[in-house]
Image (tube, rainbow, N blue to C red):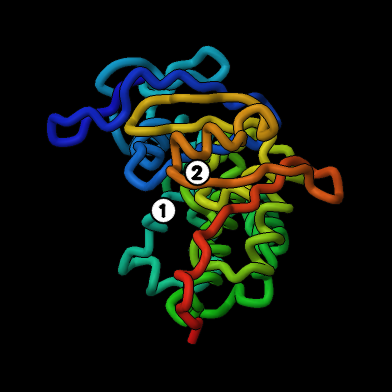
Amino acid sequence: MDVRLAGRAVVSGARLIAPPGRLTGLIGPNGSGKSSLLRAVYRHLRPAAGRVLLDGEDLGALPPARAARRVAALPQERGETSEAFQLTVREVVALGRVPHQRAFAAESAADRAAVAGALAETGMGWAADRPFAALSGGERQRVLLARAFAQAADVLVLDEPTNHLDIRHQVELLTLLRRQRRTTLAALHDLNAAAAVCDRLHVLRDGRLVASGTPREVLRPALLAEVFGVSATVVERPDGGGPLIAFHYPPDTPGEERP
C-alpha cells in the first residue's frame, strides 16, 4: 500500500497482516509513516495504491456505516471536538453505537449494555454522568477507548493509545487489550511495552516496512541501531514474557559532576 500527502509519498509498498484475535504492533521512529498508514486502514486517508482487506473485503469500497461496524479507531488526535466537550462521558461512549442504529431510532437495551460494559472495561464507569470536558487528558483517552470498545467492530485500530496515561493506566490498558483477544493493530512508541504485549510487530522506517515478526524476531540490537539509532542490549524478561530492551546511555563526561 502507498499513501501520499500533498503529493509526497509517506508510505511506500507497505504490506502487513494483523492476525485475527491478536495484538499487532506498529513501531518506528517519529515521522516513519505509522499514523499515515493507520489512517489509511480506518479510511481517514485513501491509499494512493493498494487496498485494505478484511476477510477478503475491500474496506474502501464499503458504505461508511458498514465500514464503521468492521473497524473502530482511536486516532492519535483523539477526536476531542467542541461537540464532544459538551457531552457527558456516557454520551461520548454512546457515539460508538451509532453505526449499529437505524436513523432516528431510540437507544436500545443492547446499546445501553454495550456502553456500560465499555465503561466498566476501561475503569471509567464512575464518570458516566460527568462532563467529558471535566476529565483529565488520561481520563479522556480512556473514555475514547471505551467509545471504540462500544462500537463492537471486528478490528480495533489504535494510534498511540497510551498517550496521556500515567504508568499504572498504561499497564492496565495494554493488559486489557491483550486479554480481550480482539483483532487489534496499534502504533506504539514504547518498545518495551510493545515487546511485552504484542503478538507480532511491524517496523516502519521512512515510510517503508523493514521488518515483521514476533517481538523476539524483530527487536534485535542490530535493528534497534539501524532503525532507531540507539545502542541497546536485548535480554529475556525475568517473568519469561518476552524480550526486554536495556538502552545504553553515554557515560558522563570525565570530570563533570551531575547536578
Q: Is mark 1 on a helix, strand or loop?
A: loop
Q: Is residue 218 left or right of residue 82?
A: right
Give the vertical position of 134 relative to 15 (above or below). below
Give me the C-alpha separation between circle 1 and circle 2. Answer: 9 Å
Say which quadrant the N terminus sits in. top left
Give the vertical position of 6 relative to 78 (above or below). above
Q: Residue furthest left?
A: 7
Query: Circle 1 is placed at which residue position?
Result: 76
The answer to whether residue 64 shows anywhere in this view is no
Dots 1, 2 in contact, CB < 8 A: yes
Question: What's under tag 1, amino acid-wise?
Answer: Gln
Between residues 84 and 34, which one lies in front from this camera angle?
Answer: 34
* Sequence order check, earlier mark of 1 and 2: 1
Q: Name the residue located 55 percent from the left edge and 71 percent from the top edge.
A: 139
Q: Residues within 10 Å of mark 2 (few under 14, many from 20)?
A: many
Image position, residue 225 (x, y; %): 49, 39
